[in-house]
Each structure stands twice: as structure tokens, then as C-alpha cells.
Image: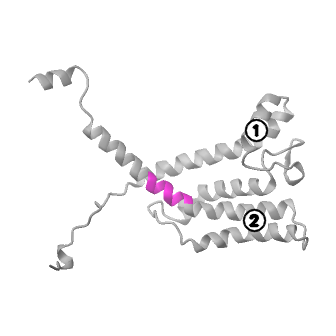
Amino acid sequence: MAISAEHYVPQVARREFSLGRAVCAWLLACAGALLYLALIFAAPLAEASGHTAVSWSLYGVFAPLCHQIAERSFYVAGHPLAVCARCAGVYAGFTLCLLLYPLVRSLRRTEAPRRGWLVVIALPCVLDFLVNFTGLWHNTHASRAITGAWLGAGAVFFVAPGLADAAQTLWRKGERREATAPARGLGAGRAAAS
């Protein structure tokens, strides 16, 4: 038996969007990105200041994420950054674009761009790598950093909507737990006894 569209009952409850939750998630992401970027610069500064254990720890944290070839890295205080020029560009581009994100796109938007845009944002990095790999042109610290910054900035448009959406879901689960949690304390025992 066919049922008309007017009688359709959605299977997923429509959820209310909280801009406050999205802003909170964005602020936490900005703080995390700034801290991460600061640690990249802290490694050579710690080394220059004679805090070898701290610098080795910081370089060690970034070692699984980057090749850390000194010849391909920017230097601060006479020591290479904790990541190469391309990775530094990616992290700096991501952080800057994340900080400016609400000026470009509403935090209320939780849909990511179409996947085809991933090609657009990754293509400059791939081309910069390929021209160097094939020997057609030798890339520079600047070309690595700029193409990396383009990739990092573009990644924000895929990550930020996901963070805003996740904030809605996580806080909502927390609210449901609080609403269904049994009352505790002295008053709870009296309420149960009566």
C-alpha cells in the first residue's frame, strides 16, 4: 500500500544547531593549532638556549610526522625548525586560515566542500614535488612553504565543518547523559524513600 509524501515520518530527528558550541569548538581548535605551531618554533629556540633535553623531546615529537632534513628546513636561532619548510607551511597555512575561517565562512555550515577540491588544494604540492623529483626544476624553501601553506589553508575547509558538527553531537550526548543520570547525594535518597 503506497503512502503519500505528506505522511512520511523522518527517521532521523532534526537537531538544533548551537552556534555557541561551534564557536567553542573553533576556539579550542585555534588554541590547539597555535600551540602546535609554537612547539615547532620552540624546538630550535630551546636548543639555542641550551635546553637540550627539551629540544630533543620536541624534535622527537615531530620526527614521525616529518623527515626533518635540515637542508630542507627553515632555521631559527641557528637551528632547524622541528619540521621541514613544506610541513611548516602546511601548519602555518592551516593555523592562519583557521583563525580567519569565521570571516570567510559561517561556523553554522557543517558541510564540507566537494571532494574534487582536495585535488585543487593538493595539486601545487604534488607539482612542486614532481618537478624537483624529475629534475625539471629544483624547488626552494619558499616554493615548499608556499605550496604547503596552500594545502594547509585548504584543509581547514574540510576540518572546520567537521569540528563544528562534532561539537554539536558530543555536547548533545553529554546533555542526554546528564538528563538520564540518576540523582545522587542526600536529597536523592529521601526522594526515593518517599
Q: Nearer the viewer, residue 90 or 2?
A: 2
Number of residues whose C-alpha sits closer than 10 Å to that of mark 2, classed few (under 14), some (14–19) or many (20 or more): many
The residue tagged 2 is 147
Snapshot quadrant of residue 7: bottom left
For marks 2 and 1, the one nearer the N-term is 1
Q: Which residues are magenta?
A: 159-166
Residue 113 on the magenta span: no
Query: Is residue 7 shown above or below 36?
Result: below
Give the main secondary structure, helix, strand or loop, of the magenta stretch. Answer: helix
Q: Amino acid at mark 2?
A: Thr
Q: Amino acid at mark 1?
A: Gly
Query: Is residue 126 shown above or below 31?
Result: below
The quarter of the image holding the N terminus is bottom left
In the rendered view, does 47 fall on the left or right side of 15?
right
Colouring used for the render: one colour
How many angstroms separate mark 2 from mark 1 (CA)? 25 Å
> Residue at horizontal 65%, vertical 57%?
94
